[in-house]
Amino acid sequence: MPPHPLRRKALARWARTDPTLHALAKRTPAPERALAGGTPFEALVESIAHQQVSIHAGRSIFARVRALGCTPAGLVAAGPDALRAAGLSRPKASYVLDLAQKAASGELDLDALAELPDEEVVAQLTRVKGIGVWTAKMFLLFHLDRPDVLPHEDLGLQLAVSDAYGVPREKAAKTMLRLAPAWSPYASYAALVLWNARRVAMEERPR
């Protein structure tokens, strides 16, 4: 895969600000990623479907939800019973319906999110039941392709930082926040590098 478009600029900055991340990005660079497809509404419904289940299960559930007509009006019309039958838990069905109702009524303008600053996108999305800061940041990173998102709440990223910087996992989030000025304005690519480095390290470990 081609290199990530932020790699060259990020490397130049991190060579001055964070030698650890600079070395990691050179050793295990994150490739250019495919952005989440579909509409903003579909991306958020998919995120809810994937919460606390395996990747395979999340994909299967989302495919069934999508078949119901994955638009705000379509899922409001489908109702909670159809969402439950598609595989969503009772709480997740209520989250999806809250998102659909807010989008259908115009209370949440999903198409306008692309024009808002990161902090306002998070504020808008976390008004929906079941969408927390982590989900909103994943939307910023993988759907809106924002360059400076730091999902320090992510467990996988915390484990990657623990490995790379030699800090206990419980201190990794604070470590990221301390390092954020050094990683900015390329924190999104920093997260991708760290996730990728941990994936590579796990694949290389003897079984």
Image (tube, helix red, strand yellow):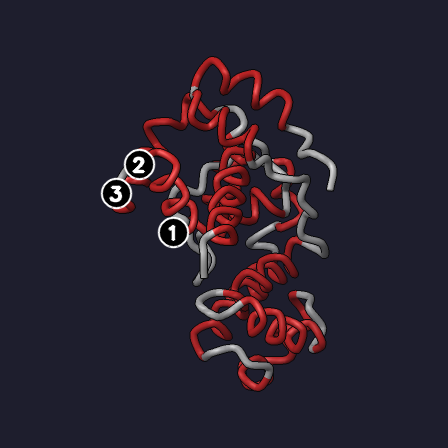
Among the 4 quarters of the image, the one containing residue 100: bottom right
Eyeballing the image, is 164 above or below 138? above
Judge left or right: residue 52 versus residue 27. Answer: left
x, y (%) of residue 99?
A: 54, 62
Q: How many other residues sit within 10 Å of disc 2, few (<14), some (14-19) or many (≥20)?
A: few
Looking at the image, which is closer to me, 25 or 92?
A: 25
Looking at the image, which is closer to me, 7 or 82?
A: 7
Q: Earlier in the sequence, mark 1 or mark 2?
A: 1
Kindly report which numbered mark, 1 or 3, lies closer to the viewer in this rendering. Answer: 3
Q: Quadrant of the N terminus?
A: top right
Checking the image for residue 1, the label placed there is none
Q: How many other residues sit within 10 Å of disc 3, few (<14), some (14-19) or many (≥20)?
A: some
Checking the image for residue 166, the label placed there is 2
Identified at 58% across, 64% down, the residue is 45
Q: Label 1 to label 2, Cα distance in Å?
A: 16 Å
**Residue bearing the label numbered 3:** 168
**Residue bearing the label numbered 1:** 155
